Image (cartoon, helix red, strand yellow):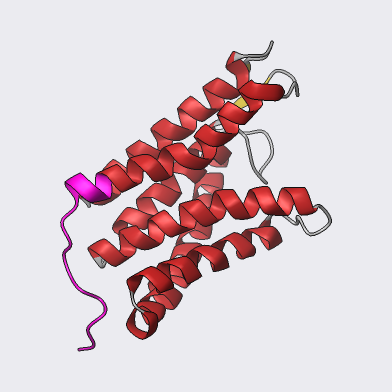
Amino acid sequence: MKQLGWAVLLSIGCCFVYHILRTLFIDNSWYYNRSYTFKGFLFNSWWVLKSVLFEELIFRGALLFIAIRKLGVQKACLLSAVAFGIYHWFSYNAFSNPDQMAIIFLMTGIFGYVIALAFAKTGSLYLPIGLHLGWNLANIILFSNGPLGHQILVRVNDLQLQGLPSLAVFLFQTLALPALSMVYLRFFVKKTKDIRVRK
């Protein structure tokens, strides 16, 4: 449970910094959605939790578990990352745009690889679920960046970053949480069980 808690906080923190950076370099800000209700918050948070649990149980809890036993940790984690990246083409409905497909595959593939390693190292879904859930809750519910429309905070306008600031924020979004997760895995998580061994 401690791993779950730290992972949620880490990913919420990274998502918060990402969204602040998205508005820092342009004339944009956020406003509080006064029509948002506590009932809406509970319903939408439940939707996010179900989607995260579905993805984690499929990609880490089932497919990765089997792949690690058959292929070993590194190949299985790579396979899981590729499958996770391709899956998000469907969830973002990106098939008509090859550039968007490449960006989605890169971002979700890197993140998928890290949470696959988290599962392989801990033998548990707590850390992968925490990393995934924290980001999705902050991104979708707090910052209204997802399929549920306007949530708690809404951007004042649709101005987008351009040039080097855009690249810097994209790199932060793609690499910050995976890099911090790898540091966490390396220095703060001890391997608890070897899931490669059949019982």
Residue 66 x %, y %? 39, 82
Nearest the eye: 142 or 91: 91
Residue at horizontal 58%, vertical 15%?
24
Task: Quarter of the image for the C terminus: give it.
Answer: bottom left
Residue at horizontal 44%, vertical 58%? 113
In the image, residue 131 above or below residue 22: below
Q: Is residue 150 magenta?
A: no
Q: Where residue 96 sits in the image (x, y, percent)?
A: 84, 56
Q: Determine whether, in the image, residue 77 is placed left or right of residue 191.
A: right
- Residue 33, position as x, y percentages in the image: 63, 24
In the rendered view, does 113 fall on the left or right side of 195?
A: right
Task: Answer whether residue 185 is magenta in the image.
Answer: yes
Residue 63 in percent (x, y) is at 45, 76
Residue most extreme to the bottom = 199
Quadrant in the picture for residue 151: top right
- Dominant SS of magenta comes to loop
* Residue 136 shows in the view: yes
**What span is colored magenta in the figure?**
184-199
**In the rendered view, would you say 105 is above or below 38?**
below
Dividing the picture into quarters, in which one does residue 98 lie?
bottom right
* Nearer to me, 138 or 62: 62
Q: Is residue 35 left or right of residue 181?
A: right
* Residue that appears at 40% across and 31% down: 13
Relative vertical location of residue 165 with respect to residue 104 in this rendering, above or below:
above
